[in-house]
Each structure stands twice: as C-alpha cells, then as structure tokens.
Image (cartoon, rainbow, N blue to C red):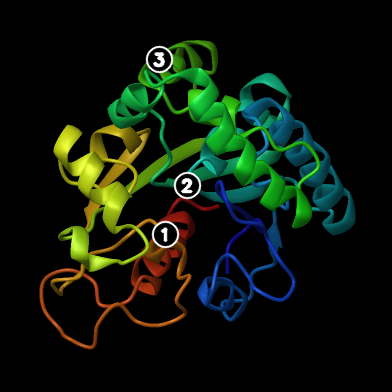
Amino acid sequence: MLKYPILLVHGMGFRDGRTINYWGRIPKIFTEDGNLVFYGGQDSNGTIEDNAQFLKRRIRRIIRETGAEKLNVIAHSKGGMDMRYAICRLGMNRYVASLTTINTPHNGSKSIDRVLRLPAPLVRFAGGCSDICLRLQGDKKPNAYEVFKSFSTEYTRRFNEQNPDDPTIYYQSYACVMKNSASDIVMCIPHAIVNAVEGENDGLLTPRGVMHGDFKGIIRSNSGRGISHCDEVDMRRRRLTKKQGEGISDILDMYREILQTLKEKGM
C-alpha cells in the first residue's frame, strides 16, 4: 500500500465514464493493494489551462475528503501536460508527491507540426467535429484545435521553459511502441504516418517525444503486436498476449512496476 492515494488522469478524446472506464483493469490492481483511487474527470478536449483549473478543484476536493497530505498522480497522454500546468502554475505542487506520465507529449510531435501546416480552416473543422461529439458526452469547454497546437514541438519547448519540474516532486515517464502499423486496427493509419515522419511510435507519439524526468525507457510487448496508445490504458480489458518471452505480456505488468517504484520511493 502506498503512503498517498492515487489520482488517475486521462488523456485526450475519452472521458472517465461510470459505465465504460478509461483505465480498464488498472484501478483494480491498485485497490487490491489497499490504495484509494480517484479519477481526474477533466474534459477530453479541454485546453491544458482549462483542464488544469478543473484538476486543481478536483485535487483540493480529494485532499479535503480524504485528509491525505498529498497524491500520487498517474497520467496518460495529454493528461500529463494538464497536471504539469496545475502543479507549476496553479499551486498544486503542495499536494502532489509524484507524477508518473505514460506517453505524454512532453517534447511535442513533429508529425503534428506537419498537420498544423495544413490550411487552418481544415484543421479547425476536424477539431470542431470532435468537439461536437465530446460535448454530447459531457465536455464543457472542448477546444480540439487549441489542443492540437499544444502538441507541437514549438509549443512544448515553450511549455517546458515556463513549467519547470518542482524539485520536491518525483517525476517518472514511460514510453510504449507498436511493432508495426497492423498491430492495432484503431491506430494503424496514424502509426504509419508518424512512423514515416519520426520513426517507431505507439500510434501517436515517439519515445523522443515523451521522455521526461526519470525516464523508464521503452516498454515493449513480447509478441509481434506491440503496445498501442489504446493498450497503454487497457482499453481492451485483456492481456496483450499469452506468450512468454522478452517484454511484457500484459499492460498491468507496467502498472505493477509503477506501484513498486512508488513504494520504494516511500510515496
């Protein structure tokens, strides 16, 4: 059991639903260890600034309700950027013991740089369609176009300068990659595009783009399938493979490692 409760912060495009949980089987391994687990609940397509404000309120409520001094935050994808802003700019550093990020675009995406060179009305239209769908699912202030821009290498360069890590907080990061574009039908097209522009990736982001703090390296599966951006949060609710060998056969193995590391750090 960890010293502090766990806050799971989701990424872009999905919500922490009551019926369909973003995190699959993952919360269960934390609760079975005796830990309290909470969810971020921020907008899917909200900007970093708007989502950070929501997370600030959420964190304060959890601290008030539990009496805990701090939280261990585990964030996927853009959720890591939302949390870093809340920590650095909104005073949440006092309530966070650790921040673990999984394929968070800390260093941006060169592929997004190219997307943003397309005519702005086209990119805005694509983002707007996504916003309409997510507003129907509960988003209050979706703004996909601004979120797209926050994944660019120039934006993240400025973001890193303006939001330095707090020395009192333990930061660690993980990267995952697919073996090939056929590994995941949902991510096959974006994987092929990113692979052509930047190299191996999880269907959206490369290891170079997600390194931050204590980088734990690239997590690979022991089968030909690899680990996609969806697999990283167990969206399919099942093992990656039944095979044994070099690499992991179940994404839960990575989260067990995260749990063990935080225990060893006294958090």
Q: Secondary structure at mark 3?
A: helix
Q: Earlier in the sequence, mark 2 or mark 1?
A: 2
Front in this rendered view, residue 119 or 18: 119
Q: Position of residue 5 (x, y in %)?
A: 67, 59
Q: In percent of the image, x 47 and y 47: which residue is there? A: 100
Q: CA distance from mark 1 to mark 3?
A: 27 Å
The disc label shown at residue 144, or none: none
Front in this rendered view, residue 112 or 263: 112
**Above or below for 4 versus 184:** above
Label 2 packing within 10 angstroms: few (<14), some (14-19), many (20+) = many
Q: Secondary structure at mark 1?
A: helix
Q: Say which residue label 2 marks.
A: 100
The disc label shown at residue 258, or none: 1
**Above or below for 196 versus 179:** above
Q: In percent of the image, x 25 and y 77: which residue is there? A: 249
Question: Which image quadrant for residue 126?
Answer: top right
Q: Position of residue 45 (x, y in %)?
A: 64, 41
Which three-letter amino acid code belongs to the residue tagged 2? Thr
> Mark 2 and 1 residues: CB-CB less than 8 Å, in contact?
yes
Which three-letter amino acid code belongs to the residue tagged 3? Arg
The disc label shown at residue 157, or none: 3
**Above or below for 255 versus 47:** below
Label 3 packing within 10 angstroms: few (<14), some (14-19), many (20+) = few
Which three-letter amino acid code belongs to the residue tagged 1? Ile
Q: Position of residue 170 (x, y in %)?
A: 48, 38
